[in-house]
């Protein structure tokens, strides 16, 4: 099994020695993207990057993501932990965080080293997509970015705003792949669904422990742990349930977005009722009443308003019932787009208890969604 020590060795380029007679040359002028962000605080740098990308034709980060990331940066915590529905802009938004943190954070990389930002994904296909997105972001602001396969891992090597050697390395989630090199941050994408090829188990706990060691206890480093809802016993679910800690900031709906989150559920409940599923409508309505500004389960339509709640429910109608493993389409939608894997408050109301019990049981044993492509 390859690891990032091999990757790092491939990335490093020996520097030719300077002869005693070599003239001292002036430092090159900083590129425009570096000068424009030098006097800004970290969150302002991220917003500057987002603005540049929008000017270049990229979609803007959603209002919820902008507000939530502002809270994360203000918290001063090491990790942002996010439970967001499928299609909620997790990967595309968080590649911008990775780029902003990697390019603009002050650091001093020793000569002969190249520090990395690992982007851990479920499978090889996801890893390639992330590095492709990062490359597009870098080129849009004028940073040379050529993606290469280094020991089988999609990699972009470049320099930060102060000329330090850095690299973005996309990794299909295995423990051995994040051992060794110094990291400048990290993104763990779809944490609840990671699977180690050797053990066939979710390696997230060990991955996080290994990544933490690569931070070398340096201040000012940030990492992201994100996932759509899946297994309530996963490390990601445990972090969400635990809430804010000294190290973790857990994303919340927020008071300004509570009505939009609740209205989406109520719209789908009305749609279910129109299609003669009274139990589904009642269950969704009861769940909607449990939402508060502090709720950490972020529905798709809140994080990405271009996908409406009812539209996301309609998409599930195209999935064959046999592909749902016995789960109802409503329960499947609640998990995939509503970020709901369990709801004790709903169960206590006595509303459709049997459906919820079956939902929880099936959710624990179901394979990955049929439209997840995993090549690792």
Image (tube, helix red, strand yellow):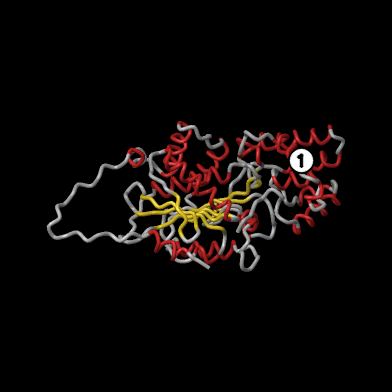
On the question of residue 348 being in view, the answer is no
In the foreground, 98 or 149: 149
Residue drawn 38% across the image and 44% down it: 144
Q: Residues within 10 Å of mark 1 (few under 14, many from 20)?
A: few
User: Which residue does the numbered mark 1 point to in the structure image?
Assistant: 318
On screen, residue 359 versus residue 129, left or right, reads right
On screen, residue 339 versus residue 22, left or right, reads right
Q: Position of residue 11 (x, y in %)?
A: 39, 59
Residue drawn 79% across the image and 57% down it: 361
SS type, badge 1: loop
On screen, residue 114 versus residue 244, left or right, reads left
Residue drawn 45% across the image and 34% down it: 51
On screen, residue 78 versus residue 105, left or right, reads right
In the foreground, 77 or 334: 334
Callout count: 1
Q: Position of residue 127 (x, y in %)?
A: 54, 53
In the foreground, 302 or 326: 326
193 over 61 or under it: above or below: below
In the picture, residue 362 is in which quadrant? bottom right
In the picture, residue 113 is in which quadrant? bottom left
Q: Position of residue 234 (x, y in %)?
A: 66, 59
Q: Position of residue 309 (x, y in %)?
A: 70, 36
209 over 368 or under it: above or below: below
Residue drawn 72% across the image and 48% down it: 335
């Amino acid at each position: 099994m390859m690891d990032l020590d091999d990757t790092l060795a491939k990335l490093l380029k020996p520097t030719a020695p300077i002869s005693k007679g070599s003239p001292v040359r002036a430092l090159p002028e900083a590129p425009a993207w570096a000068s424009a962000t030098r006097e800004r605080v970290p969150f302002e740098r991220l917003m500057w990057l987002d603005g540049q990308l929008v000017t270049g034709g990229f979609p803007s980060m959603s209002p919820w993501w902008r507000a939530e990331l502002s809270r994360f940066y203000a918290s001063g915590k090491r990790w942002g932990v996010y439970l967001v529905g499928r299609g909620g802009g997790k990967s595309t938004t968080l590649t911008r965080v990775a780029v902003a943190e990697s390019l603009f954070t002050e650091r001093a990389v020793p000569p002969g080293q190249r520090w990395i930002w690992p982007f851990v994904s479920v499978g090889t296909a996801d890893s390639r997509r992330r590095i492709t997105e990062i490359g597009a972001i870098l080129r849009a602001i004028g940073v040379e970015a050529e993606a290469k396969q280094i020991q089988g891992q999609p990699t972009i090597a470049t320099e930060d705003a102060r000329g330090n050697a850095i690299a973005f390395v996309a990794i299909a989630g295995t423990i051995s792949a994040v051992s060794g090199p110094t990291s400048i941050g990290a993104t763990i994408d779809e944490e609840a669904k990671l699977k180690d090829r050797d053990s066939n188990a979710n390696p997230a706990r060990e991955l996080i422990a290994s990544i933490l060691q690569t931070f070398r206890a340096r201040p000012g480093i940030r990492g992201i742990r994100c996932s759509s809802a899946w297994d309530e016993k996963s490390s990601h679910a445990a972090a969400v349930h635990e809430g804010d800690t000294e190290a973790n900031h857990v994303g919340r709906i927020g008071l300004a977005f509570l009505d939009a989150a609740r209205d989406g559920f109520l719209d789908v409940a009305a749609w279910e009722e129109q299609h003669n599923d009274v139990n589904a409508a009642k269950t969704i309505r009861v769940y909607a009443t449990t939402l508060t500004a502090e709720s950490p389960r972020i529905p798709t339509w809140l994080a990405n308003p271009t996908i409406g709640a009812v539209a996301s429910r309609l998409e599930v109608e195209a999935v064959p019932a046999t592909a749902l493993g016995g789960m109802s389409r409503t329960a499947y939608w609640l998990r995939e787009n509503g970020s709901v894997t369990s709801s004790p408050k709903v169960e206590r109301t006595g509303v459709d208890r049997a459906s919820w019990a079956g939902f929880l049981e099936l959710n624990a044993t179901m394979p990955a969604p049929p439209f997840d492509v995993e090549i690792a």
